[in-house]
Amino acid sequence: MSQNVLLLANEVMEKMKQYYHKSLTTTPQGAVFRAKTSNVVITAYKSGKVLFQGKHANEEMDKWSDQSNVVESKNPKQYKSSSNTLYTPPDTLFTASHIGSDEAGTGDYFGPITVASAFISSSQISLLKEIGVKDSKNLTDEKIIQLAKEIAQMRIPYSLLILHNPKYNSLQKKGWSQGKMKAMLHHHAIRKLLTKIESTPYEGILIDQFCEPNVYKKHIASEKGQLPNKTYFMTKAESHSIAVATASIIARASFVKEMDKLSEQVGIELRKGASKLVDQTIARIIREQGEDVLQTCAKVHFANTQKARQYLS
């Protein structure tokens, strides 16, 4: 049986408890909660560890991995701290010319995953700060679209990849976890950007960390990829690196545009996130157009697909 572990803050575990409130079961000693769905058992412990067990453990874990320090492991006892100095960016990186890479759409039921990598020279950092570039999670979608246009006007070199839902669902059926999909998207986006900037000097590459560096390396190695030199990982990197913040805005702006296109294509406004409103929207789509339509616009392995069935009766 597949099982994986996340390290999460108390507020995130509380958020999870609310998310899985309909699946809560008897809480074991030392735990905060336990939830049991049709494909996975999630147990959150007071230590901050959250254990995912079952057929779809990887997929369920991926919904929360961007809010944590992650270890994908057959045995949770094998976990070691992620404070690996080999992949920790030096403080000097944030004021130097560097590449940042980030993604959007990973926790949303509807829409694709978008990944962007951006190269920012040291001379552009202050201007990007002036126009308001910062963590996209603290910006409205309208502001993100506006900033993305300003970034484009600055002719900042970037690479953008979009994993559309039909391909996402195909890879998932082949056994790819969302973590592997994200790793490969980042890897290809960075490689494309390195080709684009050619011999331009840079101090390093910073990836907004969604899994342990060794897990990332394992994912790309499985597809014959290698980690470029001077690649670093950092959680919440967009709060420290303008390059990652820029990539985050580009990725999010693309995701918002893709969601608008899909909403127009389906003829129904598709909700972002993975909330109860999303479940109701799924049910409406199934009623009006059939379940097969979800393959074109949704990450169908998410638990929301099953949750939506309660609104069909």
Image (cartoon, rainbow, N blue to C red):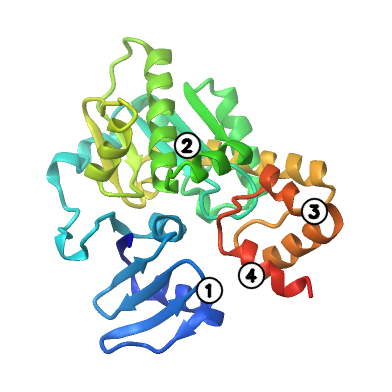
Q: Which residue is mark 2?
A: 246
Gap between marks 1 and 3 measured at Cα: 26 Å
Between circles 1 and 3, the one closer to the viewer is 3
| Amino acid type, callout 2 | Thr
Where is residue 57? Give x, y as percent: 40, 61
| Mark positioned earlier in the residue sequence (4 or 2) | 2
Gap between marks 3 and 4 measured at Cα: 16 Å
| Amino acid type, callout 1 | Tyr
Numbered mark located on residue 290 in the image: 3
Asked whether residue 131 appears in the rendered view, the answer is: no
| Amino acid type, callout 4 | Lys
Residue 135 falls left or right of residue 153: left
Where is residue 225? Give x, y as percent: 30, 26
Q: Nearer the viewer, residue 277 or 195?
A: 277
| Mark positioned earlier in the residue sequence (4 or 1) | 1
Above or below residue 294? Residue 282 is: below
Gap between marks 2 and 3 measured at Cα: 38 Å
Between circles 1 and 2, the one closer to the viewer is 1
Instruction: Indicate the secondary structure of the residue bearing disc 3.
Output: loop
Q: Which residue is mark 4?
A: 307
